Amino acid sequence: MTARLLELSGIRAAHGGITVLHGIDLAVRAGQVVALLGPNGAGKTTTLKVAAGVHPPTGGRLLLGGRDATGMPPGDLARAGVCLIPEGRGVFPNLSVRDNLQMMTFTGRAREEIEETAYARFPALGTRRAQAAGTLSGGEQQMLALARGLATDPAVLLLDELSMGLAPLVVAGLYEHVAEIARQGVAVLVVEQFATAVLKLADHAAVLVRGRIRWQGHPDSSLHAELSSYYLGSPT
Ligand SMILES: Nc1ncnc2c1ncn2[C@@H]1O[C@H](COP(=O)(O)OP(=O)(O)O)[C@@H](O)[C@H]1O
Ligand SMILES: [Mg+2]
């Protein structure tokens, strides 16, 4: 088994003095897709923000490649290969697809290389390179957000609610890309409120409820039973 690239150990975090994460233990290995599931307000986004260094933990440790990265500034974590794709599509709507990608040249990679890599992975972006990102479909905007994230050559990819507001077929297509990204060795931590699509590719899943992990293991029928107890009337 490959080494743990990202590890959260006993992570606690608060918003405005109120503790919302009460000791999270979670690890993602290279090439793995780990799904963090749970209802609205459970603390999923906060967990990703702690992992990316944009929200400080009040306790516990963040480990990157086995080394303590607790309290490391987000820029240092990004340079170390941690990439967060935030909820609600990390693209600039008024800029073209090409300009959205061009901004990623801060990574030191050439514009042509970034564009070619993005269009090879997501041909739909290539045909729309001059179009304003805000006029793309929701699925295409997520492709662009992924392409921007991949331009940083991440070791750890953190995805927050990739499926938000998208049709099931579009979500399935995006998750095929996520599976491919993991196969190339990236450690992927996916947060979703509604589980269906991500469980097909997840190697490991955790259910977060009110800031505590209630269940974690290989996605199987016991996970489905666990989820249905927290999502009354919701698709699992
Ligand atoms: N910026 C914030 N200020 C105050 N409370 C927040 C903030 N962000 C999140 N919270 C609270 O922290 C808890 C966890 O939120 P969040 O991590 O966004 O959950 P999830 O992503 O699972 O919906 C919720 O109770 C939420 O209201
Ligand atoms: Mg959230």
Image (spheres, helix red, strand yellow):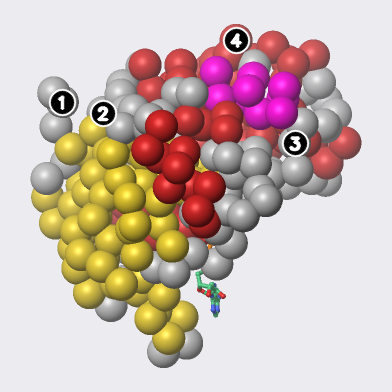
Residue 187 in view of the camera: no
Q: Quadrant of the N terminus?
A: top left
- In the picture as drawn, the residue positioned furthest to the bottom comes out as 17
Q: Nearer the viewer, mark 4 or mark 2?
A: 2
Query: Could you tell whether 99 is left or right of 43 in the image?
Result: right
Label ID, residue 2: 1
User: What residue appears at the point 55 percent right and 67 percent down from the top-left corner?
Assistant: 41
Label ID, residue 30: 2
Q: Could you tell me if the residues under marks 2 and 1 are in contact, i.e. CB atoms within 8 Å?
A: yes
Work out whether residue 182 or residue 107 is closer to the camera in this orientation and state it: 182
User: What residue appears at the point 57 percent right and 33 percent down from the top-left corner?
Assistant: 196
The mark nearer the N terminus, 4 or 1, is 1
The three-letter code of the residue at mark 1 reads Thr
Work out whether residue 221 or residue 90 is closer to the camera in this orientation and state it: 221
Residue 26 horizontal/vertical position (percent): 26, 50
Tell me the residue that label 4 is attached to: 120
Tell me the residue that label 3 is attached to: 166
> Which of the 4 image quadrants contains residue 168?
top right
User: What residue appears at the point 45 percent right and 42 percent down from the top-left corner?
Assistant: 225
- Within 10 Å of the Cα at label 4, are there few (<14), some (14-19), or many (20+) other Cα atoms? few
Q: CA distance from mark 4 to mark 3?
A: 23 Å
